[in-house]
Image (tube, rainbow, N blue to C red):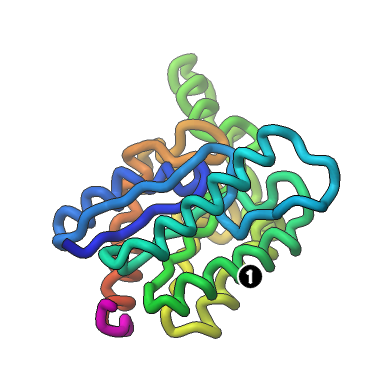
Amino acid sequence: MPAIALWGDSLANHHAPSLDDLARRMGFALVQLTKAGCSPRLPVGEGRAPRTTEARVCDGFRAAALQAILADPAIRIVVVGGNWDAGGTLDAALASLGEAVRKITASGRGVILMAPTVAFASGGGRCIARRRFMGLDEAGCAMPASEAAARASRVETALAALAATDPLVRAVLLRPHVCDATTCRPLIGGQVAMTDGGHLNVAGSMALRGDLAAAIGSLLPALPPAR
């Protein structure tokens, strides 16, 4: 059975409900390779700045995940999600992601890059839940769309550029689902879509099935025959 892999940190893991549903419907197995706090990219390697045990464990996970993807001929598409802006240098993280993506596509597999959601300093979904419970105005849970765009632009631009230069890569931007022209809210279709300030809940994940389905559907005809 052909398979789809989900690789990344908790910002990949929150796509598991919708991806599992889609995989079943489309006749794919799902291979999940996620580790909280460990953004998907090439291992940093030794010989750099002093490194913590957590960083070494994360590097080991990155290496093992990439090896597992490249070694499994059943895996045809890899869905990638992460917080590349967490620690270190964003430009270096994005460059490393690009190298990892090129390794995957060079093997004849497709890649779907999932942009992070909007990061709500208010607490996002928790803020909405508290204010609804207390009967308070929810306006304080929102943030200006211009602020969200400014924070997201570097990552979204980098992901879109990767997709534009490789026919086996697609980028899915999540910000339009929670932002209109002026305001971003942790809601999709009026329903609370986030568990906190940055992670989707199950309802939010399922609300994005259409985006994932479209990306998968557009990749399938572009994939070379399985090796």
Q: Is residue 77 above or below residue 143?
A: below
> Along the line of sight, which residue is nearer the eye, 123 or 56?
56
Taking the magenta stretch, the answer to whether it contains residue 224 is: yes
Q: Position of residue 71 (x, y in %)?
A: 38, 63
> Along the line of sight, which residue is nearer the eye, 65 or 220?
65
By secondary structure, the bulk of the magenta-drawn segment is best described as loop
Q: Is residue 73 visible?
A: yes
How many discs mark residues in the rendered view?
Answer: 1
Where is residue 76, by image quadrant? bottom left
Q: Which residue is mark 1?
A: 158
Q: What are the residue bounds of the magenta stretch?
A: 222-227
Q: Position of residue 19 (x, y in %)?
A: 30, 52
Where is residue 156, by image quadrant? bottom right
Residue for point 27% across, 52% down: 30
Residue for point 26% across, 60% down: 3
> Along the line of sight, which residue is nearer the eye, 125 or 99?
99
The N terminus - image quarter: bottom left
Q: Amino acid at mark 1?
A: Ala
Residue for point 26% across, 73% down: 217
Q: Position of residue 92 (x, y in %)?
A: 74, 62
